[in-house]
Amino acid sequence: MKWIKWLRLISRYIVGIVFVFSGFTKGVDPLGTVYQFEDYMIAYGSQWALPLALPGTVILCTLEFTIGVALLLNFKMKITRWALLAIMLFFTVVTFLDAVFNLVSDCGCFGEAIILSNWQTFYKNLVLMVFVMIIFFTHRYSISSFSTRIQNIMAIVTMILFSAFTVYSYNRLPVVDFLDWKVGRDLVPDDQGKPVTYLIYKNKLSGETKKMLSRDLPWQDSVWMSQWEFFDTEIDDSHVMKSHGLKIEDSTGTDLTELYLASPGYHFILVAYDLEKANKKGMEKMVRFCREATHDDVSIILLTASLPEVAESYREKAGAAFEIFYADDIILKMMIRSNPGLLLLHDGVIIDKWHFHHFPEYEEIKKQIIPN
């Protein structure tokens, strides 16, 4: 029947777009997805599986993206419908448990692009399941315009290319950065703005509501005031700059955040949330970089979540010239998807970021930060 074909077509496009978007947002930031995998493994008491977080990320992102492409282009639907049903049943059960028991604060289903609460994620999956069931039970109406050979090639090529893209992204910073700490962000804007509170009044007869600022309320109009009554308030904070959440402390707990974020000029921040897990070659290169930078009196500090004794032991062994300060490991992971990673700030604005695979030589950027 024609209406069933149209219903199936619409369902394919809706679910396909969601899966392509979900796979891409996780695949473009695979290290963030690895962190999510690790959170789940710890929540379910499966610490033994932590080494599988990276391969699991590549498989999941590739599977989601490939299913999405298959739905949009209508190929390999016999296999796709079963894979789609299985993965959606799994996601729905997991997100239900998250919502009920709050096992993790964020499932990361759309990476950092869209953040949903656990209940919102579960309801989203319930809605998607309706379309998934339509796709699954109307498979007899699925007729691909591609030959079996072409469908096989399309599936294989999609999986190879996207898995390669995910691995590529893992070894670099995200090509599309959905994080708050993206290049160009002003960490100390001149006017961060303040939330605006609106008063909502309701007409006693018609039930109509009006929203207005307190200063615009017609207090002197006794007739209006007798016809309307206070109903609710609404706070608009959409224009307010989000807090970066970073708190820089020394080993005694002294807050030095403003000193390094609000000070004028150029500042390098080397981030290594876990010094014991940090890439050794990357850290060795940064030690050399820091020696050259400090020789020119360029500000550079190391931020870590490692214990002070671990940090000081590392500095002594490495002969590092930078000062070491401390911050929350979650914020450090958000600052840069690299351990270690390097940020360059100028007057509180993030100018550039580097993954440890692509750390610059100091001489490469010396001319930029030190005028002739």
Image (tube, rainbow, N blue to C red):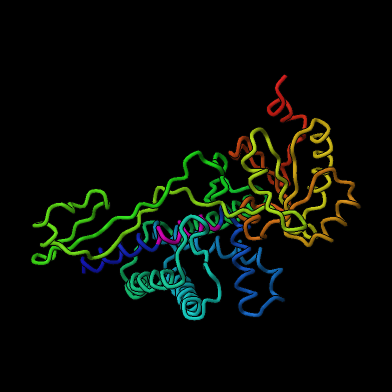
Q: Nearer the viewer, residue 63 or 348?
A: 348
Secondary structure that dominates the magenta span = helix
Position of the N terminus by quadrant: bottom left
Q: Residue 114 at x, y = what percent? A: 46, 58
Q: Residue 213 at x, y = what percent? A: 27, 51
Give the answer, above or below, for where 221 lies relative to 229.
Answer: above
Identify the residue shown where x is 56% and y is 44%.
187
Q: Quadrant of residue 116?
A: bottom left
Decide if residue 336 is on the left or right side of residue 238.
right
Give the answer, above or below, for where 137 lies relative to 18.
Answer: below
**Total labels drawn:** 0
Q: Which residues are magenta?
A: 16-26
Q: Is residue 20 magenta?
A: yes
Decide if residue 71 is on the left or right side of residue 173.
left
For residue 340, say whether it is visible: yes
Q: Quadrant of residue 121?
A: bottom left
Q: Quadrant of residue 290?
A: top right
Give the answer, above or below, for where 109 lies relative to 102.
Answer: above
Q: Residue 131 at x, y = what percent? A: 34, 70
Q: Residue furthest top?
A: 372
Identify the residue shown where x is 17% and y is 51%.
218
Q: Nearer the viewer, residue 50 or 299?
A: 299
Give the answer, above or below, for where 74 lies relative to 51.
Answer: above
Identify the residue shown where x is 62% and y is 67%.
56
Q: Residue 283 at x, y = what percent? A: 80, 48
Q: Nearer the viewer, residue 134 or 311?
A: 311
Position of the C terminus by quadrant: top right
